[in-house]
Image (tube, coloured by chain):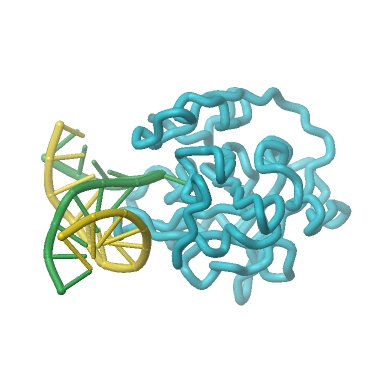
Chain colours: A cyan, B green, C yellow
Amino acid sequence: MVGTNFNFKKAKKRKKSFFLKDAKYVAKNILGDFLVLKKRKHFLVGRIVESESYLGLGDDASHSFSGRRTARNEILYHQGGIIYVYLIYGLYWCFNIVTSSKTNPQGVFIRALEPIEGIDQMKRRRGKGKKNLTNGPCRWTEAFGIDKKFLGKKIYSDKIYILQKKKKNFDIVETNRVGIDYATESKDLPLRYYIKENRFVSKK
DNA sequence: CTCACGATTAGA
DNA sequence: CTAATCGTGAGA
């Protein structure tokens, strides 16, 4: 459908410089791009269809709100371009890309992918009978086998990287973020982005 | 040390 | 609607 006319060989890897930009910029511009994960004997590829930005210091939904700095979120206080994963509910892994500078602890949360390559392997990791493959933040991480091993790893390496989709032939919907009822001030900011009418966007 | 809880999901 | 399930972080 979408991946078919995309030339993976010609596509360029997103470099570190891209991730030094503001989280809003990265979250929006990463839509339509491809997340590539190299496994031992195969590749897993997914198109990023939904993201959220977490703005750090001034964002009370963010783990680093008002400079909170703990063992878990320490990685946010690094330059952009590395991975922040954490365990949620003792069950699932959430995947973020650190953006901006050391003093601006922002992140981009990847909420959903459209499966492109390695679909059989994704299904195997998710387990039989699971209807949803990659249309949720902790669904796609399970399909890709994302866990604590990825904490602090570069998102522009040989093992895991993003391929830029140059022609963005879709509309972006901007809306409020999901699952942040604990926030007050920032709760309803339009910091969630997704590809309009894409069927792999997470559902309520 | 204790303890409430979460950037979610699956299933009744 | 609720259970699952445990590392984390705030507080005593």
Q: Nearer the viewer, residue A91 or A113?
A: A91
Q: Is residue A136 left or right of residue A175?
A: left
Q: Nearer the viewer, residue A75 or A66?
A: A66
Q: Measuring from the top left, give residue B8's x and y in whole percent.
A: 38, 44
Q: Nearer the viewer, residue A167 or A1?
A: A167
Q: How many marks?
A: 0
Q: Measuring from the top left, give residue A54's x and y in whole percent.
A: 56, 42
| Residue at x 43%, y 51% (from the top left corner) | A138
Which quarter shows the N terminus of chain A? Answer: top right
Q: Is residue B12 left or right of residue A190?
A: left
Q: Measuring from the top left, give residue A187's x and y in whole percent.
A: 44, 29
Which quarter shows the C terminus of chain A? Answer: top left
Q: Is residue A198 left or right of residue A61?
A: right
Q: Is residue A32 left or right of residue A144?
A: right
Q: Nearer the viewer, residue A154 or A2?
A: A154
| Residue at x 49%, y 59% (from the top left corner) | A69
| Residue at x 72%, y 44% (from the top left corner) | A33
Q: Measuring from the top left, give residue A60's x and y in whole percent.
A: 46, 38
Looking at the image, is A189 positioned above or below residue A78? above
| Residue at x 47%, y 69% (from the top left corner) | A148
Tell me if I can see residue A1 in this picture. Answer: no
Spot the residue most to the right: A10
Tell me if I can see residue A74 in this picture. Answer: yes
